[in-house]
Amino acid sequence: QVQLVESGGGLVQAGGSLRLSCAASGRTFGTYGMGWFRQAPGKEREFVAVITRSGGGTDYADSVKGRFTISRDNAKNTVYLQMNSLKPEDTAVYYCAATTGFGYVRYGTQYDYWGQGTQVTVSS
């Protein structure tokens, strides 16, 4: 069992930056691929970024590529999402999730554990 707790959300102006953190419980953090997803009001949840177990590989949605960076610190059981050049369309609840799948897992149904989410609001 893995428990995930996100933090770092908030209100920011367009063009600004935020860094989200996701702290995981347990001793097996390094055995999970970690992803970030988001869900805006009235929209379906969408993939944002994923990082492999070792942190050696990352993948991003086209909408955030070049602006967002996912990273992890396995010693701290934490995954991060650095978000730069934020746009109003990035406004959503952001969720981190853990998967036992291998490679770049983009589908939410392949994730085993989810956090409660953190709100990110970007004003224009």
Image (cartoon, rainbow, N blue to C red):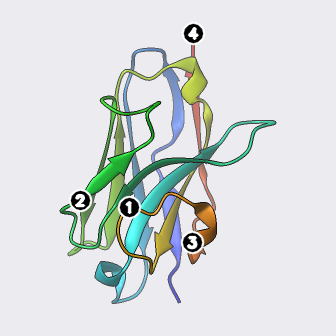
Task: Name above or below for residue 25 compared with residue 62.
Answer: below
Q: Position of residue 19 (x, y in %)?
A: 36, 41
Most distant residue in the right direction: 42
Task: Name above or below for residue 120 compared with residue 31.
Answer: above
Q: Which residue is mark 3?
A: 110
Q: Which residue is mark 2?
A: 57
Q: Looking at the picture, which amino acid does disc 3 mark?
A: Gln
Q: Is disc 4 surrounded by few (<14), some (14 to 19) or many (20+) residues within 10 Å?
A: few
Q: Secondary structure at mark 1?
A: loop
Point out the tag, 1 or 3, that comes first from the N-terminus.
1
Q: Looking at the picture, which amino acid does disc 1 mark?
A: Tyr
Point out the tag, 2 or 4, that comes first from the N-terminus.
2
Residue at 53% in and 35% down: 10
Q: Which mark is residue 104?
A: 1
Residue at 29% in and 80% down: 30
Q: Is disc 2 surrounded by few (<14), some (14 to 19) or many (20+) residues within 10 Å?
A: some
Quarter-of-image position of residue 114 = bottom right
Nearest-to-viewer mark from 3 and 4: 3
Q: Which residue is mark 4?
A: 124
Q: Looking at the picture, which amino acid does disc 2 mark?
A: Gly
Point out the tag, 1 or 2, that comes first from the N-terminus.
2
Q: Position of residue 65 (x, y in %)?
A: 35, 33
C-alpha span from label 1 to label 3: 11 Å
User: Left or right: where does residue 48 sit relative to residue 74?
Assistant: right
